[in-house]
């Protein structure tokens, strides 16, 4: 399935963020350290580049991500112009306390009390923006919840005499271009439940985990998933079996098992997991480009089965199939 989720309030939020961008110095962009590029909103990049604003790229939830992969992403982002990357957990005040100083390095012209540093938090839903805001201002001013789109309005607060901070609602983009990105976002609870089929998202997640983190699955669920017979679908069935999740009649309750896998991943109970790396991202983009550049083929007359060749040609190239 293709994951698409763009609630109406996001259009207004995007417009207000674009207006606020004119009067801030540094964008603090939060992404999920487990899927940094999939959780990077291209609209945020577009807005800040239009205004030529530097970006402190914060890979939040780093305590749940694979540390080696996270380091690779830090190096990847630090090679980009106007970007400084840091990995942390927004739930740790000591980590968050470093951010104003890091922002200061990106805006050295705002270095005294007469010109306070103006920062703005941006990012996708449910990535930790409100938690970051509350920790930085040292009081609860932004509503926090374990679901996307909790924050609906923009607000600005004074951290101290030298720093102001603007929090913005979580923003997705109108069309998620790559299906894998949508599935990773759904698995990570960045889209509304009404935009996904949880069993399909969990099956996608299970496939990734089988390829990269089999020992963590074995440790969590108490069975070895490395046998050749275990694939993403049968992994969900195994979770249902070991957790005793049965439907009336005795069959595996795959829907409940899917929710167990998704929640365990979201809560960090599976261990430190990253869903993408710079190399897997590059390979995915290359495959998508190749697929778009490959011309569709119309089968030759003698290859048609159950159709008239002239009728197929009259329907245009869209009737063809990819090789």
Image (tube, rainbow, N blue to C red):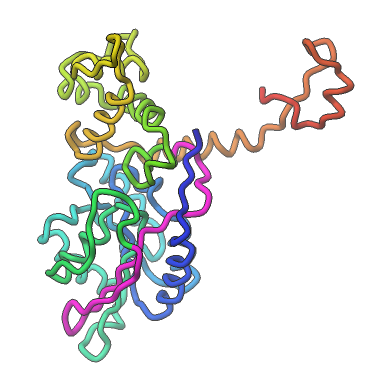
Report the residue at 30% width, 68% height from top. 167
Please provide percent x and percent y for residue 211.
33, 23
Relative to 140, say whether 303 is above or below. Answer: above
Horizontal side of residue 152 vs 142, given as left or right: right
Horizontal side of residue 238 vs 13, given as left or right: left
Relative to 58, say whether 103 is above or below. Answer: below
- Work out which residue is located at the far left of the displayed protein and give it: 94
Q: Quadrant of residue 293?
A: top right
Relative to 263, say whether 111 is above or below. Answer: below
Give the residues drawn in magenta, as a range: 152-181
Please provide percent x and percent y for residue 276.
36, 38
Relative to 257, say whether 228 is above or below. Answer: above
Report the residue at 38% width, 46% height from top. 191
- Work out which residue is located at the far bottom of the displayed protein and give it: 114
Q: Residue 162 colored magenta?
A: yes
Report the residue at 24% width, 61% height from top. 130
Q: Nearer the viewer, residue 86 or 139?
A: 139
> In which quadrant will I find the C terminus?
top right
Please provide percent x and percent y for residue 285.
51, 40
Please provide percent x and percent y for residue 157.
24, 77
Q: Quadrant of residue 245?
A: top left
Q: Nearer the viewer, residue 124 or 247?
A: 247
Q: Residue 40 colored magenta?
A: no
Report the residue at 89% width, 21% height from top. 310
């Amino acid at each position: 399935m293709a994951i698409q989720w763009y609630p109406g309030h996001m259009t207004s939020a995007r417009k207000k963020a674009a207006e606020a961008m004119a009067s801030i110095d540094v964008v603090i962009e939060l992404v999920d350290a487990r899927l940094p590029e999939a959780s990077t909103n291209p609209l945020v990049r577009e807005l800040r580049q239009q205004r030529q604003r530097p970006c402190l790229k914060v890979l939040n939830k780093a305590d749940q991500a694979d540390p080696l992969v996270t380091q690779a992403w830090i190096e990847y982002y630090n090679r980009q112009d106007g970007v400084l990357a840091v990995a942390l957990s927004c739930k740790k005040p000591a980590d968050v306390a470093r951010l104003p100083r890091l922002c200061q390095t990106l805006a050295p012209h705002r270095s005294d009390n007469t010109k306070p540093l103006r920062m703005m938090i941006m990012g996708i839903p449910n990535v930790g923006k409100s938690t970051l805001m509350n920790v930085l201002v040292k009081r609860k001013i932004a509503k926090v919840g374990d679901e996307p789109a909790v924050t609906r309005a923009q607000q600005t607060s004074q951290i101290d005499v030298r720093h102001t901070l603007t929090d913005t609602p979580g923003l997705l983009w109108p069309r998620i271009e790559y299906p894998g990105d949508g599935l990773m976002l759904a698995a990570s609870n960045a889209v509304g439940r009404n935009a996904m089929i949880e069993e399909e998202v969990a099956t996608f997640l299970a496939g990734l985990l089988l390829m990269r983190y089999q020992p963590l699955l074995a440790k969590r669920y108490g069975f070895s998933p490395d046998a050749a017979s275990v694939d993403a679908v049968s992994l969900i069935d195994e979770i249902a079996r070991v957790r005793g999740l049965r439907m009336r009649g005795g069959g595996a309750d795959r829907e409940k098992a899917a929710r167990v896998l998704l929640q365990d991943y979201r809560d960090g109970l599976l261990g430190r997991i990253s869903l993408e790396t710079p190399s897997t991202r590059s390979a995915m983009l290359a495959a998508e480009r190749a697929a778009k550049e490959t011309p569709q083929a119309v089968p030759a007359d003698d290859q048609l089965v159950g159709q008239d060749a002239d009728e197929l040609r009259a329907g245009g190239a869209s009737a063809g199939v990819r090789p």
